[in-house]
Amino acid sequence: MTEGDRNDGGTDASGDRDNPDGDPLAGLAEREGWHVEGAAARVHYEGEGDRYGIEFYAPSDCVLYWKVPPAEGGETAVPVSRENVPPPLRERIRMDLDAAGIDPEIERRSL
């Protein structure tokens, strides 16, 4: 993965790490590489020679994985099943969710 290591912060009285106001999108926005757009947050990673876009949708509490074409390619990103995503990347996403005060188990949720 290329986005760097997890940035551990403290835990507030409510138990949320790095997210004292409890807003899951604000919590993810504080994580390295995450960007919020509307009701969703997105981050990009590289792993095992592939590029991935990961999106968290707050209204439905779900995580989607996309395989992203090379920067020089004119292709379109395509959704991929989590079984095809490298396990270290999935673990990183669960760590980011947890640090943002989001139940990391939603990463495993099927649509």
Image (cartoon, rainbow, N blue to C red):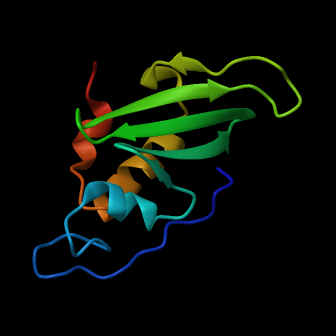
* 81 to 2, vertically: above or below: above
Q: Residue at x 63, y 63 (%)?
A: 4
Q: Is residue 69 left or right of residue 43?
A: right
> Farthest residue in the right direction?
72
> Farthest residue in the left direction?
14
Q: Residue at x 28, y 21 (%)?
A: 110
Quadrant of residue 76 within the rendered picture: top right
Quadrant of residue 8 within the rendered picture: bottom left
* 15 to 107, vertically: above or below: below
* 17 to 46, vertically: above or below: below
Q: Residue at x 21, y 72 (%)?
A: 21
Q: Is residue 8 left or right of residue 78?
A: left
Q: Position of residue 101 (x, y in %)?
A: 24, 61
Q: Position of residue 91 (x, y in %)?
A: 43, 47
Q: Residue at x 36, y 49 (%)?
A: 94
Q: Position of residue 37 (x, y in %)?
A: 46, 46
* 12 to 34, vertically: above or below: below
User: How many numbered badges does the structure rendering display?
Assistant: 0
Q: Is residue 97 left or right of residue 15?
A: right
Question: Quadrant location of the C terminus?
Answer: top left
Q: Position of residue 74 (x, y in %)?
A: 83, 20
